[in-house]
Each structure stands twice: as C-alpha cells, then as structure tokens.
C-alpha cells in the first residue's frame, strides 16, 4: 500500500534468455490507472540506451536491442488517484520476429487516500 500523491520508482529489467543479441525489440510498459509519468526521470536513470522511447499518457514503449546481460529501465511516477489498481504485465516483443517475446507477471497495488 502506498499513499496518494507519493512518487514511486518503477524498475524494469530486460534480457535475452538465449544468449543472443536481438535488435528491434519493443518493451511495452502499461501503467496502472492513477499513475502519472514524471517525464524528466525517464531519460535520466537508464542503464540501457534505447533507440527510441514513445511516451504516452498510459504507457511507455522502449525500442532497442537486447542481449544476454540484463538492462535496466527506471523512471518515476506520481500516484494521483486512490484505489486498488491492477499493475499490467510488461511485454517485450521483437518487431520483425513473432517467435521472440516475453512478459512479466501482473500484480495489484493499493493507493490509500491522503488524509
């Protein structure tokens, strides 16, 4: 449980499981309802240099190459709305090879109303 109005850091780790380097990978991070992206934090705290980052209101999409060493995507989000929310799975897909894909598990988060 976290408090409404707080900032949280989101960390995503991505790697190839076949010890190969794969190009043209899209990593899609759908945000739970009530989360607002802190845009400046997106480019500041990356251990990975994606070729492009598509920032939308409800998601971040990173495009780049992934190898066998884990890379880390990290950014900050503000919790704007109280309630219980589903944290969607993060997906990674090769844009030109349908056989390359992966995802995390989904979970839940409770945002308590700030008194």
Image (cartoon, rainbow, N blue to C red):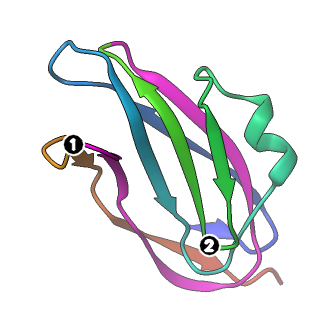
Callout 2: 10 Å neighbours few (<14), some, many (20+)?
some
Q: Which residues are magenta?
A: 69-96
Pointer 2 or 1: first along the chain: 2
* Secondary structure that dominates the magenta span: strand
Look at the numbered disc 1 and give the secondary structure of its residue.
loop
The image shows residue 87, relative to residue 19, as above or below, that is: below
Q: Nearer the viewer, residue 111 or 104?
A: 104
Seen in the picture, residue 45 relative to 98 is either above or below; the reply is above
Residue at the image position 12 percent from the left and 44 percent from the top: 99
Q: Residue at x 43, y 46 (%)?
A: 26
Which residue is under mark 2? 58
Of the 4 image quadrants, the one containing the C terminus is bottom right
To which quarter of the image does residue 74 belong?
top right
- Which quarter of the rendering shows the N terminus? bottom right
**Residue 56 x, y percent position in the rendering:** 68, 67
Mark in front: 2 vs 1: 1
The image shows residue 83 at horizontal and vertical percentages of: 58, 87
Is 52 or 11 nearer to us in this picture? 52
Q: Is residue 61 left or right of residue 43?
A: left
Locate residue 71 relative to residue 3 in the image: left or right. Answer: left
Q: Is 20 left or right of 36, judged from the image as shown?
A: left
Mark 2: which secondary structure? Answer: loop
Residue 71 inside the magenta-drawn segment: yes
Q: Which numbered circle lies on residue 97?
A: 1
Q: How many residues crowd around disc 1 within 10 Å: few (fewer than 14), some, or many (20 or more)?
A: few
| Distance from Cα at disc 2 to Cα at disc 1 | 26 Å
Measured as percent of width and height from the top left, residue 59 is found at 58, 65
């Amino acid at each position: 449980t976290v408090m409404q109005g707080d900032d949280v850091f989101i960390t995503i780790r991505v790697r190839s499981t076949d010890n190969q380097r794969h190009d043209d990978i899209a990593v899609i991070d759908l945000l739970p309802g009530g989360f607002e992206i802190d845009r400046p934090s997106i480019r500041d705290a990356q251990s990975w240099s994606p070729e492009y980052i598509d920032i939308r209101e409800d998601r971040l999409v990173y495009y780049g190459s992934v190898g066998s060493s884990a890379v880390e995507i990290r950014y900050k989000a503000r919790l704007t709305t109280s309630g219980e929310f589903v944290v969607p799975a993060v997906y990674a897909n090769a844009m030109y090879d349908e056989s390359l894909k992966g995802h995390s598990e989904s979970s839940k988060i409770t945002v308590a109303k700030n008194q």
